[in-house]
């Protein structure tokens, strides 16, 4: 079952191309991380998927056109757009009542059970809550909706590490199952590494790398090269090289595992290091093309 | 899955509208606080005046006249308050949610832009007139009871007072509020909602400037003032005769006749206004669909 299907998705603001003809194919039961620098086009792509902005190209979310059928789509799709978009005047009890009133898939008892684990009181207004509590509240509301697709755009921005950890733990343990799909963007790359099933690097409106986490483990190897083997290792064409504590760490794409093992300690790279390597090469390629 | 699709189909189309209107009242509490506060203030003043006059005048007929004057004043005051509330509300209704980005939360729910705009338009067109009616009537009844109590206490018969709040007068008030404040002013509210959905900042300025510009261009180009006159008449001022019976006027009891009501309901002014209102609201729905947070 395909949840998001995009072909040639494109969005232009004046002279700026925010999303440049990307193809997307997200299947049910996946947790996709969209990673990219600021202004890469992540939020624009998500806004198109959520029916918040018009676009060019073909896009179907759960079989619907998000731009013309947003209200029907939102029965099955849920999103946390940004921190602090909950209306500040609203009381927690009013949020529960309102969602019960307008959302056919909202389970009030579940939301209340989730809120009972926090310090949030029902009589509080959103403006009286701390930043972390607002996110907790929003997540409780969203997790109580029996949606098929959940989109999170920088959900933990500005939160301390304790809240961030709780956020993803709660999402994985209390919400996610194989019939749901989650798309998430964040700058805190390392924190979602163990959460994701799929990864997509996006830069200048284009997809630079898109594959499953299993593929990443199969394709990419990071080697802490022993000093005597550095020259030999460089000959194997690493995609990236960095120095740490006097040792060279080289990153390889589709290299022979046995050859690498002879050079030093081999491990799977972190997303952040992979991101730096892939994006760095991108910039190099762009410069090369310009010349 | 089966129970879920049942739940979906069981949700009546009126249900979201009901919750959206409640939502507006949660957010904009001044909608009912303002008229209630004015009513409380009037009652306070009336209490002092009644106690004072109870000593001064002993003539029941004179008292009835003073009372009629007061109840008419209450009507105008509360109506004026809710009219200002309506204008203020409309200008902020579709602007505030974009400014504080909460529109992103509202749009994450299965609620259409049409329902949202309709719920916001129903505040000035339906909710405020009914609220004005209820508050005005309650205030007048309390005044009646207060006056009667004071008169009884000073040994007078309050019977003359009790002819004041006749059924005819109450019906006229309700009609006036629903027809004039609801329907006749509908294009004004719809225009303000449209500006509120469109303007990036200063909706108050944008609501007035284009109208002023049209008036100025007309004056310079043709040396006429039709547009300004029309606007003035619509807002109830100007030199034109109001197209509806005014409550509490001398002819009030005669004005509430079927021909008068019928005449207003089929007058082209009302229907042209309603068509304009519908066009403005349709444009506001389109803008709500495409506008992003500011």
Image (cartoon, coloured by chain):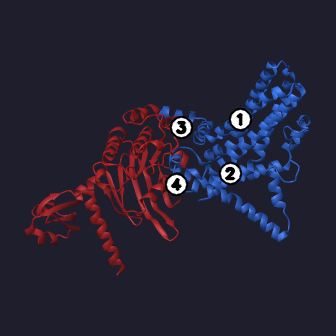
Chain colours: A red, B blue
Mark 2–mark 1 distance (CA, rounded to whole Å): 32 Å
Q: Describe residue B32's horizontal placement relative to residue A150 as left or right.
A: right
Q: Residue A98 shows which numbered tag? A: 3
Mark 1–mark 3 distance (CA, rounded to whole Å): 30 Å
Q: Describe residue A235's horizontal placement relative to residue B64 as left or right.
A: left
Mark 4–mark 3 distance (CA, rounded to whole Å): 22 Å
Query: Residue A287 in the image: x percent, y percent?
Result: 34, 76
- Residue depicted at 85% across the width and 20% down the height: B156
Q: Which residue is mark 4?
A: A52
| Marks 1, 3: nearer the viewer | 1
Question: Tag 4, which chain?
Answer: A
Q: Residues within 10 Å of mark 2 (few under 14, many from 20)?
A: many
Q: Can residue A129 be seen in this snapshot? A: yes
Q: Residues within 10 Å of mark 3 (few under 14, many from 20)?
A: some
Q: Residues within 10 Å of mark 4 (few under 14, many from 20)?
A: many
Sequence-earlier tag: 2 or 1: 1
Same chain? Circles 2 and 1: yes
Q: Between B111 and A238, which is closer to the camera in this rendering?
A: B111
Question: Tag 1, which chain?
Answer: B
Question: Tag 3, which chain?
Answer: A
Sequence-earlier tag: 4 or 3: 4
Q: Which residue is mark 2?
A: B281
Screen quadrant of the C terminus of chain A: bottom left
Q: Which residue is mark 1?
A: B39
């Amino acid at each position: 079952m395909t949840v998001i299907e995009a072909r040639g998705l494109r969005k232009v603001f004046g002279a700026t191309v925010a999303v440049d003809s990307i193809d997307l194919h997200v299947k049910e039961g996946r947790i996709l991380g969209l990673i990219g620098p600021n202004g890469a086009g992540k939020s624009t792509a998500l806004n198109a998927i959520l029916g918040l902005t018009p676009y060019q190209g073909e896009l179907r979310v759960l079989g619907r056109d998000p731009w013309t059928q947003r209200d029907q789509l939102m029965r099955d799709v849920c999103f946390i757009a940004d921190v602090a978009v909950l209306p500040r005047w609203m009381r927690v009890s009013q949020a529960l009542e309102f969602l019960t009133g307008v959302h056919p898939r909202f389970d009030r008892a579940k939301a209340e059970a989730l809120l009972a684990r926090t310090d949030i009181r029902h009589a509080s207004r959103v403006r009286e809550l701390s930043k972390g509590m607002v996110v907790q509240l929003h997540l409780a509301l969203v997790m109580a909706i029996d949606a098929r697709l959940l989109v999170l755009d920088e959900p933990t921005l500005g939160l301390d590490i304790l809240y961030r950890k709780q956020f993803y733990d709660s999402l994985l343990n209390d919400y996610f199952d194989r019939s749901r799909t989650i798309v998430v963007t964040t700058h805190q790359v390392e924190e979602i590494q163990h959460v994701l099933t799929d990864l997509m690097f996006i830069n200048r409106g284009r997809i630079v790398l898109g594959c499953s986490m299993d593929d990443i483990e199969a394709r990419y190897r990071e080697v802490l090269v022993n000093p005597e083997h550095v020259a030999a290792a460089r000959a194997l064409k690493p995609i990236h090289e960095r120095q740490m504590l006097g040792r060279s760490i080289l990153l390889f794409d589709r290299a022979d595992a046995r050859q690498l093992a002879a050079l030093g300690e081999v491990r799977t790279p972190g997303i952040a290091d992979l991101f730096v390597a892939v994006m760095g090469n991108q910039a190099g390629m762009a410069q090369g093309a310009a010349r | 899955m089966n129970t879920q699709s049942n739940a979906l189909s069981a949700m009546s189309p009126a249900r979201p509208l009901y919750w959206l209107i409640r939502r507006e009242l949660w957010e904009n509490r001044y909608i009912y606080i303002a008229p209630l506060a004015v009513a409380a203030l009037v009652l306070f003043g009336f209490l002092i005046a009644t106690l004072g006059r109870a000593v001064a005048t002993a003539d029941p007929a004179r008292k009835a006249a003073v009372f009629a004057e007061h109840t008419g004043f209450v009507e105008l005051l509360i109506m004026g308050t809710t009219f200002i509330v309506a204008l203020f509300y409309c200008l902020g209704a579709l602007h505030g949610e974009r400014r504080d980005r909460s529109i992103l939360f509202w749009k994450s729910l299965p609620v259409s832009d049409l329902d949202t705009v309709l719920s916001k338009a129903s505040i000035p067109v339906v909710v405020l007139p009914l609220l004005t009616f209820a508050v005005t009537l309650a205030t007048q009844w309390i005044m009646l009871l207060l006056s009667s109590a004071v008169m009884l206490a000073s040994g007078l018969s309050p019977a003359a007072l009790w002819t004041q709040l006749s059924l005819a007068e109450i019906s006229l008030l309700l009609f006036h509020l629903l027809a004039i404040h609801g329907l006749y002013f509908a294009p004004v509210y719809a225009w303000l909602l449209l500006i509120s959905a469109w303007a990036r900042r200063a909706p108050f300025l944008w609501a007035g400037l284009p109208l002023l510009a049209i008036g100025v261009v007309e004056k310079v180009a043709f040396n006429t003032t039709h547009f300004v006159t029309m606007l003035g008449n619509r807002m109830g001022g100007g030199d034109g005769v109001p197209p509806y019976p005014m409550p509490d006027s001398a002819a009030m009891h005669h004005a509430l006749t079927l021909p008068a009501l019928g005449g207003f309901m089929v007058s082209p002014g009302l229907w042209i206004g309603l068509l304009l209102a519908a066009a403005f609201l349709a444009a506001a729905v389109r803008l709500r669909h495409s506008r992003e947070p500011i």
